[in-house]
Image (spheres, rainbow, N blue to C red):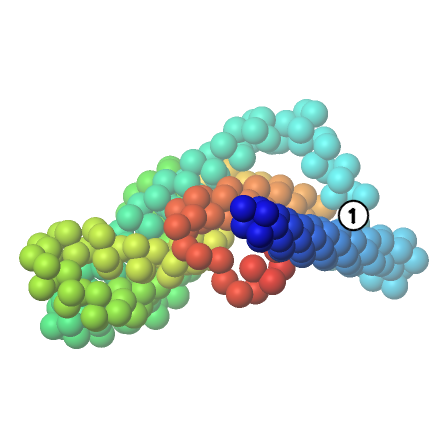
Amino acid sequence: MAENLSEHQVRSTLQAEIDSDEATVAARARRRHLMRRWRILGGQLLFAVVIIGGWQLFTDWGIVDDFFVGQPSGIVHQVVDWFQHGTEFGSIWTQIGVTMEEALLGFVYGVVGGVIFGVVLGQFRFLAEVLGPFIKIVNAVPRIVLGSIFVVMLGLGTPSKVLLASVLVFFAVFFNAFQGVREVDRIFISNARVLGASRWQITRHVILPSALTWITASLHVAFGFSIIGAIVGEVLGAQQGLGLLISSAQNHFNPDGVFGAMAIIAVITLVAEGLISLLERRLLSWRPPSPAETSAGV
């Protein structure tokens, strides 16, 4: 009995030491990861200070003409003025809301269309080979031409911007979804067929989860394209929106206004990028962490 108790104590002690070592390693990895994040943030802030500070100094000293590139202080003044007194086309919040509505609608329509076409053509090789040349031809058409055509067809309102944004988003998502479906392990599909799964069940439980990494990766680029589509459409012709602000500022030789609108767009895009990253983590929570994430303590 004494020997068994002693052996139990030894095992308990060893297990406690192992747990303690694992906790120490995990805590050390978390500290390394946190320190790395702080170093990256510090480097980004330093880079921003150098760029913006250099821009301000060079224009103050007359080395660079602020008539063409504006000044950071002038841009800040312009943005503050817009938020305090509005723009010549109405409240700045209205301009932001119009552009965001066009971009979000274009993003949703483009993503849905790209995923559906990508998944379908990825599974039917004959259909993909028939439609492939036509898709490449449409993708090769300059978007600025399509934007002009959409404005003529649908007018200066929201539909023409949404359609242009949808076209830009569609191709970014389509090619990723198509390639993601093609990369699915055929052994999994064959095993599912052997087990009696229908085509819809294979698509839902095997193909879509496998291609989800490709599709979510394309969303980061796709949202940027939806913003570009909305802005380009508004520059070509609109009654409201941030693109109209940029076009108006450009026509009045006001570079601070152009860069001010671009700064607002950059902030919106960064916020959207963060939300898409959260969505990506939620959708891919089932995926085991990569070796890089594990070593970083994520």
Residue at 59% of width from left, 47% of height from top? 2
Q: Residue at x 38, y 37 (%)?
A: 157
- Residue ID at (49%, 58%): 289
Q: Counting other residues with Cα less than 10 Å from the Cα at mark 1, is it few (<14), some (14-19), or many (20 or more)? A: many
Q: Is residue 285 visible?
A: yes
Residue 267 location, quadrant? top right
Q: Is residue 233 visible?
A: no
* Point 43% across, 36% down: residue: 101
| Vertical comparison of 29 with 266: above or below | below
Q: Secondary structure at mark 1?
A: helix
- In x, y percent, where is residue 239? 46, 36
Residue 194 vertical placement versus 228 (above, below): below
Q: Residue furthest right?
A: 61
In the image, 108 versus 44, the foreground residue is 44
Say whether residue 201 is left or right of residue 243. left
x and y percent of residue 216 in the render? 40, 54
Q: Which amino acid lies under the numbered mark 1 shown in the image of this protein? A: Pro
Left-right relation of 161 to 83:
left
Q: Nearer the viewer, residue 2 or 170?
A: 2
| Closer to the camera in the image, 100 or 284 | 284
Q: How many marks?
A: 1
Front residue (pair 44, 85): 44
Residue annotated with mark 1:
72
Location of residue 287 in the rendering, given as x and y in whole percent from the top left corner = 41, 55
Please say if 243 is above or below 115.
above
